[in-house]
Amino acid sequence: MTTPFDPEPRRRGILAGLRASFLTGIVVIAPVGLTIWLIWTLVGWVDGFVLPLVPSRFNPEQYIGINLRGVGVIFFLVFTIVVGWIAKGLIGRSLIRFGEGLVERTPVVRSIYSGIKQIAETVFAQSERSFEKACLIEYPRKGIWAIAFISTDTRGEVADKATTMGGMVSVFVPTTPNPTSGFLLFFPKEDVIELDMTIEDAAKLVISAGLVYPNGDKAKAAVELMARKSA
């Protein structure tokens, strides 16, 4: 209920409404537009690099007269698959070992090659090694919680010398906003709280600095349960 003495609510002006609509439109358009632009630019870059290496008789532009964007990407994918198929065979492995032996005897080239190879194997190689689950740990001190990723059960000399009652796990604590860097820590299993959120959701939480918060109620409940147990 209002009285004659209450101030009248201020109405939003036309410019304020237009500004709000403009900002909302930017939020909707920017991710889509930037994604399309990045893909289009990447495809054009691959085409510009690959197509000059393709014989003209295999280039569709020679027959239809139109520069089809993405043809270079198709050639690159086919070439990469063929090379990978050959490399998995006996002859391919022998050729790779012979080539790497030559590279290892070249002082400057071997440093560049080994670095690029390590990066490629880390980023692209398919293997069974991956993070198992997202978790919560008390880090860097008790009472402060951090998102981490469970790698494996701790084994070898580290597990033998750092004895605990229930075993230890290796966890990776990522940094914000770049989750590819971080710290490798070894925690007792009883001090690690496994989360229901996926690895992808946990990574989004780290990258966004806490702005994108998936499955927040379950994580909060897990922290409260751990606090009650330690009380």
Image: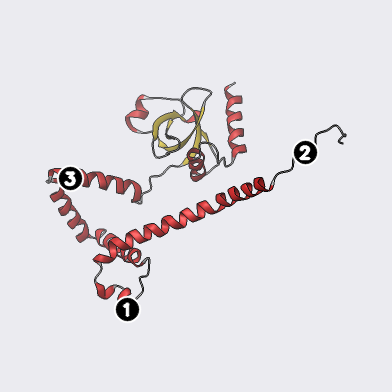
Quarter in which the N terminus is drawn: top right
Callout 3, which amino acid? Arg
Foreground: 144 or 88?
Answer: 144
Please give left or right for residue 225 compared with residue 46 in the image.
right
User: Where is residue 114, by image quadrant?
Assistant: top left
**What amino acid type should be assigned to the residue bearing mark 2?**
Pro
The mark lying in front, picked from 2 and 1, is 2
Taking the view exactly as shown, the residue that stands out farthest to the top is: 231
Q: Residue at x 49, y 45 (%)?
A: 200
Tell me: residue 192, above or below residue 13.
Answer: above
Q: Which residue is mark 3?
A: 110
Instruction: Pick the quarter of the image with the C terminus.
Output: top right
Q: Depth-wise, is mark 1 or mark 3 nearer the camera?
A: 1
Tag 3's secondary structure? helix
Residue at (25, 59) in percent of width and height = 87
Can residue 108 be spotted in the picture? yes
For residue 9, which numbered disc appears in the image? 2
The colour scheme applied to this rendered structure is secondary structure
Residue that mark 1 sits on? 63
Residue at mark 1 to residue at mark 3: CA–CA distance: 43 Å
Sooner in the amino-acid sequence: mark 2 or mark 3: 2
Q: Are the residues flagged by discs 1 and 3 in contact, CB closer than 8 Å?
A: no
